[in-house]
Image (spheres, rainbow, N blue to C red):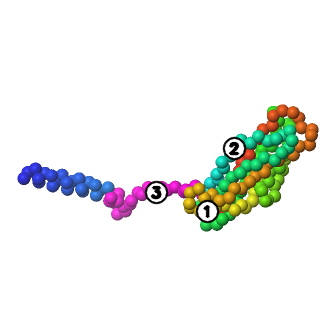
Amino acid sequence: MKASVAAVMMTALVTTGAAANNWSSAPRDDGQTQFNVELSGSVPQRCQMFSKQEKSIELDLANGGTEQFRFKAWCNTDGTKGLLVVGANALTNADGQSIIPMKVKLKGGEGSVIDRDNNASSSTNYHAIETSIEISNSTDSGKEGQYNVLNITPQLNGWERSGEYKTNMYVSLYPM
């Protein structure tokens, strides 16, 4: 009997202790009491792009041929439009002085030339392309919509300095 009374008392103490965690702070002399509530949350990724091809492209600087970058786009929005922003640093030789201009064009749209003045390092003309594109907003996985194609064409004049030329390009997508 003593054991069962002790068990009931222990249960009452444990239950009271657990319930005490749900009470507001101890009251102050002025009568105020409060809860401190921690809040958190996360925002899911709004847009995503997908490409099957390598993200390292070898430009044909001997002949000036066009290379392509293909990608699909998806945004978690009510609409079917996204803002595509494309830019690149100037295509330069190891000496940093020799530049080969590149024309970057979204298939079916207008493009722009990336050169000494119009490039990602410029303070005024850093986007070669800033345009609205069709995107998918399907919640089905793998339904990123149609492929978008960026055409990249070096603009050769026949007087380029020999050597290796390099740059990098960004392709960004924002929800609209």
* Quarter of the image where one finds residue 19: bottom left
Residue lying farthest to the left in this orientation: 1
Q: Quick one: label 3, few (<14), some, or many (20+) residues within 10 Å?
A: few
Tell me, yes or no, if residue 118 can be seen here.
no
On residue 39, the disc is 3
Q: Real-space Cα distance between discs 1 and 3?
A: 29 Å
Q: Residue 41 carries which label?
A: none
Vertical position of residue 129 compared to residue 100: above or below: below
Q: Residue at x 86, y 39 (%)?
A: 62
Residue 133: give x, y in percent of width and height. Answer: 71, 61
Horizontal relation, residue 68 to residue 135: left or right: right
Question: Which stretch appears magenta?
Answer: 22-46
Q: Which of 163 and 69 is in front in this view?
A: 69
Quadrant where the C terminus sits is bottom right
- Residue at 85% across, 44% down: 64
The CA distance from mark 1 to mark 2 is: 24 Å
Q: Identify the residue at horizontal 26%, vertical 54% (top origin).
A: 17
Q: Residue 55 carries which label?
A: 2
The amino acid on which the numbered mark 3 sits, given as a three-letter code, is Leu
Q: In this view, does 166 lie to the left or right of 135?
A: right
Per the image, label 3 sits on a secondary structure element best described as loop
> First in sequence: mark 1 or mark 2?
2
The amino acid on which the numbered mark 2 sits, given as a three-letter code, is Lys
| Residue 99 pos. (x, y %) | 85, 40
Which of the two discs, 1 and 3, sits closer to the camera? 1
Above or below residue 17? Residue 96 is above
Q: Position of residue 34 (x, y in %)?
A: 38, 60
Check residue 137 in the rendering and tell me which mark sits there, or answer none: 1
